[in-house]
């Protein structure tokens, strides 16, 4: 490495306090998922390449440009997961006889996509996702959107907008695609180089493109909300009505499409106004009623979202609302001379009582141990010197201002607990 200790391009080391902020985001994700009745699902970090090629779409950016794919020693093509939904649905199909119906799944995992690294876009990132598999009612769409909204609002993000759309289904989308292709044919030379050659096979990619050229073309493109069949229109109206009933503010964005081919009907994104336009989406999802069939299973409706926790962290920092790190140690214990043995025992007792405790390694001077106590973030230091050891007491020092008091040795845990 020749002295270069930076991580691989497109990845990032998370160190305190940012790592603690991320740990809090993960903990709160698991907490809300559990409270809302979602069950934990953990799928492998890699999966069969075919799973993503078939479900994401052979012409999608994920498949053509962003997947980390390799052959193992047996010649099998494997891919590091670029997203979580396809693997969860695969796992559901494999174990569906053992699982409740509908199945409400939640996961927090690392995912990988190759792309040009920039602020808010990493090649390795953490994703919080939920899925409701086996339920086609619009109430399920409302449930997953409401969960994402509750999680993000609890983080106190202010510059946040929920955008919703319907992208139809196998009935109304084909005629809309023909209309869209005809429009794009008229504007072919205005489309960005990347999508000019492929839009005839997947025209909705142009609507999802973030380049200035494609966004200008998309601004006047026909919208699918005017071409929905009656069942899709009724489903979308029910979703919007459910959001309004729940008091969830949203706006219809008729050009919103998701970047994966398996989406049908409902599509939604939470967009942060504190991030650049190209990386503003912190959470996206929708309905994917045809995904199970693409994988070779029976028809099984589903809806869910994926939330980029790294991007949520960046949005919080941009708003000056970095997550409060979880509390560290409650007490740093200092032992001097013959008091070190008592100090070690006190650390064990405090930890056993449920309090965070730490101490220095080795017999170090008092000043050095006090410096270590300050760096630990603990509100209190418990000092056990030779005098305290003989008297059966501990000197409790408040590190913020140095105020001290003596506490009987056996009452230290209760004394700390009583002070919050």
Image (cartoon, rainbow, N blue to C red):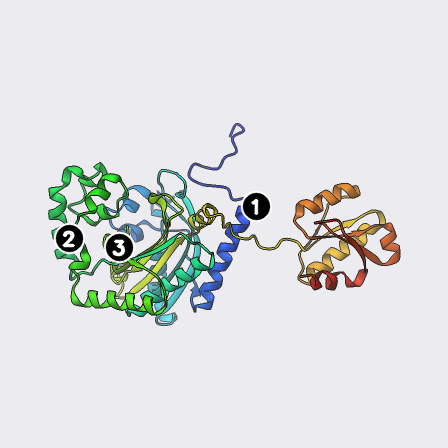
404 in relation to 138, above or below: above
416 in relation to 138, above or below: above
Disc 1 packing (10 Å; few <14; some 14–19; many ≥20): few
272 in relation to 93, above or below: above
Q: Secondary structure at mark 3?
A: loop
Whole-angstrom CA distance, mark 1 to mark 3, is 38 Å
Extreme residue in the top direction: 2
Name the residue: 36% across, 43% down: 276
Can residue 244 be seen from the camera position used here? yes
Disc 3 packing (10 Å; few <14; some 14–19; many ≥20): some
Are the two marked residues, 2 and 1, in contact with CB atoms closer than 8 angstroms? no
**N-terminal label among 1 and 3:** 1
In the picture of the structure, the residue carrying the numbered disc 1 is: 16
Residue 109, image x, y percentages: 44, 53
Can residue 364 be seen from the camera position used here? no
Are the two marked residues, 3 and 2, in contact with CB atoms closer than 8 angstroms? no
Name the mark on residue 177. Answer: 2
Quarter of the figure with residue 291:
bottom left
Whole-angstrom CA distance, mark 2 to mark 1, is 49 Å
**N-terminal label among 3 and 2:** 2
In the picture of the structure, the residue carrying the numbered disc 3 is: 253
Quarter of the figure with residue 217:
top left
Name the residue: 49% across, 47% down: 320
Q: Secondary structure at mark 1?
A: loop
């Amino acid at each position: 490495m020749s002295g270069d200790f930076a991580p691989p391009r497109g990845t990032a080391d998370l160190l305190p306090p940012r790592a603690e902020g991320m740990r809090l985001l993960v903990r709160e994700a698991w907490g809300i998922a559990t409270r809302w009745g979602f069950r934990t699902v953990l799928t492998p970090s890699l999966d069969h390449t075919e799973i993503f090629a078939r479900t994401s779409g052979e012409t999608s950016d994920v498949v053509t440009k962003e997947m980390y794919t390799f052959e193992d020693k047996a010649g099998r093509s494997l891919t590091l997961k670029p997203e979580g939904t396809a693997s969860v649905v695969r796992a559901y199909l494999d174990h569906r006889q053992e699982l409740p119906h509908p199945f409400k799944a939640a996961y927090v995992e690392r995912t990988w996509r190759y792309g040009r690294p920039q602020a808010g876009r990493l090649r390795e990132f953490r994703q919080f996702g939920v899925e409701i598999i086996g339920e086609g009612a619009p109430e399920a769409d409302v449930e997953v959107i409401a969960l994402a909204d509750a999680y993000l609002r609890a983080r106190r993000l202010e510059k946040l907008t929920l955008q919703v759309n319907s992208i139809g289904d196998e009935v109304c989308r084909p005629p809309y695609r023909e209309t869209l292709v005809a429009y794009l044919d008229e504007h072919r030379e205005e489309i960005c180089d990347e999508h000019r050659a492929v839009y005839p096979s997947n025209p909705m990619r142009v609507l999802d493109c973030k380049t200035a050229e494609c966004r200008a073309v998309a601004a006047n493109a026909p919208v699918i909300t005017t071409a929905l069949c009656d069942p899709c229109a009724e489903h979308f109206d029910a979703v919007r009505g459910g959001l309004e009933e729940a008091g969830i503010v949203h706006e219809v964005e008729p050009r919103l499409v998701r970047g994966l081919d398996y989406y049908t009907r409902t599509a939604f994104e939470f967009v942060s106004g504190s991030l650049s336009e190209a990386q503003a989406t912190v959470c996206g999802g929708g309905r994917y009623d045809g995904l199970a069939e693409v994988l070779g299973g029976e028809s099984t409706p589903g809806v869910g979202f994926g939330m980029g926790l790294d991007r949520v962290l960046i949005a919080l920092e941009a708003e000056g609302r970095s997550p409060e790190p979880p509390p560290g140690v409650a007490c740093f214990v200092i032992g001097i001379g013959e008091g070190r043995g008592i100090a070690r025992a006190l650390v064990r007792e405090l930890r056993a009582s449920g309090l965070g405790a730490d101490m220095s390694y080795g017999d170090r001077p008092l000043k050095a141990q006090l410096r270590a106590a300050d760096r630990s973030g603990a509100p209190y230091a418990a000092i056990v010197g030779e005098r305290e050891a003989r008297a059966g007491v501990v000197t409790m020092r408040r590190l913020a201002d140095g105020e001290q008091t003596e506490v009987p040795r056996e009452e230290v845990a209760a004394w700390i607990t009583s002070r919050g």
